[in-house]
Amino acid sequence: MAVPRKETSKLLLSSTQSTTSDGKSSDRYSISTTAITSDEYYEVYCQPCDEDGARLPAKGYCSDCKEHLCRDCFIFHRKNKLSKHHTLLDAKSMPTSLQQPTTATNTATSDDLTTPCPEHSKEMIKFYCKDHKKLLCSVCVTLKHTTASCKVNYIPDISTQYVNSKEYHTKLKEMASFSEKYKKIIEDLKKLTAKSNSSLTEVLRDIRKFREEINQTLDEMERRAEDEAKLIQQSNENFLKTMETTHSDLMNSLSLSSNTIKELNTSDQANKLFVALKLAEKTIEESKRNIRHVQSTVVDEYDFKPNEAVLEGIEKEKSLGKLVPKRCPTQPIEMKPRKSSHQGQVNVKISQDKDGCQISGMVLLNPDTIIITDQVNSTVKMIDTSRYLVTDCLLLDSRPRDVTSIISTNVAVTIPSEQKVQFISTNIANKLTKKRAISVDGDCHGISCYRDKLIVSFFNPAKLQILDMDGNILTNIKETNFLRSPLHVATNNSSIFVSDWGMKSVTILSWKGEVIGSYGGMGFPSGLALSDVGTLFVCDNEKNVIEEIAEDCSIGNVVLKDIVSPYVVCWCAERKMLYYCCFTMNDKDDNFLHICKM
């Protein structure tokens, strides 16, 4: 028995039925006060009311919430948006004690809805928004997809109509079709890779052949130098031999003449002595001349002076040659004109912003998401392109400049004032989160990523650097002949593209830093974006146009004109959409992301 208690009161939600103007009945609810006497004791009572201090008899049970409910809570449970699809048992079917039964009286229709919501990990997906074509949990429905704005269905209410449906068969066919396409793509890639590897085998053979030709040329040059030295040696030997013979003969002649003169003087043959002495005068004069000649003769010593041009050429080039993709010389590059239509704009200024926006970097993360850097407000923002709104914003300590995607859930942002590259993640509930950072040795501006390599542009001095993901410098490009004010960069497997407003051009480089081509005659080239067909979109902030130029920078076409100072651009191949932002110092232009269908 319950301990007697004083009478308490409880506000109850009672239901009445009325008829509307169109003849349909509707439930209306009114608040009434019901007296609960203290001498009433209920073994099975309403658990939500009991928590508020009032004990009412249970008239039903929710299998999802595992709670007994009074009459009013039972009615409200049916009407509430979050619980209207719960499995409710009436008084006859409900458990007869507050202890949860070991076997359920009725199996819930949502027991097999066990897929976690990607945004709310503790909630299961139970709803589908027809307007946005998205699977939702109860939190998603409450926060973002209300029935006032969206057509939301409870999955068990609509799922049975999809069994063996037309969509079921269509989707299977589409998936099978795509599987076949992927299979063909893989086969084609294998063939292309095999051809590439085969060509590289030929390249290795050509490198060895070229090295052999260089060796032959150097061997020939060495032989010529050796022959010259040997020729001089032989000339020295011949000269020495000639001089030895000549002077030996003169020595013998002098010795013979001297002996003759001595004998004539001893035998007192005056006439012959006189003649011999006079003949000796000529021999002595000739000897004097020969001695003077020999003393003035110089036999040179030699040093080897290397050919500086050969040495400088080898030191300057640093390689035997370069690998270039094969091009068909008979197939000129063509640029097809594009048609465009403006699809609208997204206001990227949010309530937290202290100033008007200045978007200095932009990258497409996926078809529904663009990441932008707002340098004036020191923020990185996430844009939902399907809903035309800013979904998240990350405040940084300093002004960011440019942004590039690393993988599908990570981006890297340059921060010039701190001389660092900041990595940012987007994989937790579509929220921007700061991760690690790497230091760089200058005021970094543009950034692009390709296969775990970062290419970063710098001002003062103008340079490009290729870094690994830990910030180690792999290549340092400081050539000032083609770099003056490098701004934005873009990359693919073979090339680096640089917009340089000082040079008024876009320059294409190899990954070794060699200039391949240049597209000049621009006003103020800035943002770059590679298309899916290898062409390059580039903003000309001064000429108020966006151009599409060929991969080799040989030709280009204007694809958007009469737009106010476009500064950054990105391309979505899947939707054929071109996105751009302007930099005019005017809020009515700078605070928007513009969307064009190409």
Image (tube, rainbow, N blue to C red):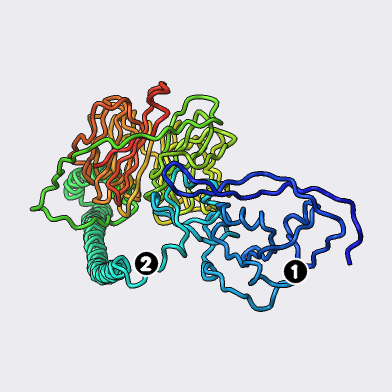
Against 73, is 378 above or below?
A: above
Question: The residue tagged with tag 1: helix, strand or loop?
Answer: loop
Q: Residue at x 45, y 31 (%)?
A: 460
Judge left or right: residue 512 versus residue 36: left
Q: Nearer the viewer, residue 352 or 542?
A: 352
Against 327, is 105 above or below?
A: below
Judge left or right: residue 530 versus residue 348: left
Identity of the residue furthest to the bottom in this view? 103
The Cα–Cα distance between marks 1 and 2, rounded to whole angstroms, is: 37 Å
Where is the N terminus found, in terms of image quarters?
bottom right
Mark 1 neighbour class, 10 Å CA radius: few under 14, some 14 to 19, many 20 or more: some
Image location of residue 280, percent across then percent down: 21, 47
Q: Residue at x 66, y 70 (%)?
A: 94
Q: Amino acid at mark 2?
A: Gln
Tag of residue 161: 2
In front: label 1 or label 2:
1
Q: Which residue is mark 1?
A: 98
Image location of residue 248, percent across then percent down: 25, 58
Against 584, is 23 above or below?
A: below
Judge left or right: residue 355 versus residue 453: right
Tally of marks: 2
Identity of the residue furthest to the right in this view? 3
Q: Nearer the viewer, residue 554 or 463?
A: 554
Q: Amino acid at mark 1?
A: Leu
Where is the C terminus found, in terms of image quarters?
top left
Mark 2 neighbour class, 10 Å CA radius: few under 14, some 14 to 19, many 20 or more: few
Image location of residue 571, percent across then percent down: 32, 44
